[in-house]
Amino acid sequence: MFMRGFERFVGGHGLEMRIERFALFQSLFRPGDSEHLDVAEGRKLFDAFFAADEHDIDPAPGAAEALADLARAASVVILTNAPGPGRDARRRWLTRHGFPYPMIVSSGLKGPPVKALSARTMGAVAFVDDLLPNLESVATDAPDVRRFQMVADERLRPFAPVAPERHTVLHEWTDLGPAIAAAIAPSQGRPRR
């Protein structure tokens, strides 16, 4: 899971992560400081983390198995906002951890690329993300896409903004995989959520 891997990475740079809100760079502190690290410094560490050839991220439990099950009847595509220098490392990480699916790199909100991908299929489409702005962007740009919010790191869940009336919220792949399968089943057509 990204946050745990990034936490280990910043720990190697003499920093600590205090999860007190759903904000990555505002969770980074020098030990003993009461003010979080400057956001620009946090962004540099983020870019350095993704540029590392073998970055230390554990996959979310059950994700590889759930996506493999879904891939038996559907196309799985990984849409990532990985920074440019980390793209090759991200591809290697995905392959090494059992995610041999096409990877599309974008930047910014995910509504426009999801809309473009959705237009290329006649079947139902599902989108999974942890960030509410990405889910809202998809709701605006591709309203027929079924949206699921999943925050893998349980420490972040109490702080994550959610809109369960607009996006299904499931945090475990054991629940999420079957929910996606049901949402994209051929008899369901192109669902609205």
Image (spheres, rainbow, N blue to C red):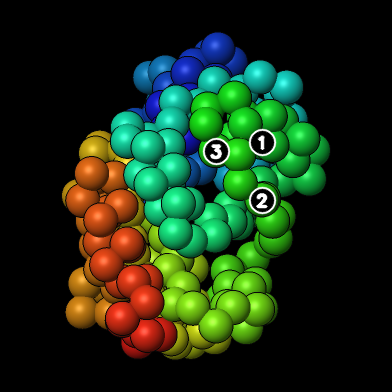
Q: Is mark 2 on a helix, strand or loop?
A: loop
Q: How crowded is mark 2: few (under 14 residues within 10 Å), some or many (20 or more)?
A: few
Three-letter code, disc 2:
Pro
Q: What residue appears at the point 48 percent right and 61 percent down from the top-left corner?
A: 74
Q: Distance between the residues labelled 1 and 2?
A: 12 Å
Q: What is the x, y in percent for residue 12?
A: 55, 12
Q: What residue would you read off at disc 2?
A: 102
Disc on res. 90:
1
Q: What residue appears at the point 58 percent right and 52 percent down from the top-left corner?
A: 78
Q: What element carries label 1?
A: helix
Q: Which quadrant would the N terminus be assigned to in this image?
A: top left
Q: What is the x, y in percent for residue 36?
A: 45, 37
The earlier-in-sequence mark between 1 and 2 is 1
Q: What is the x, y in percent for residue 86?
A: 73, 36
The earlier-in-sequence mark between 3 and 1 is 1
Disc on res. 99:
3
Q: Which quadrant would the C terminus be assigned to in this image?
A: bottom left
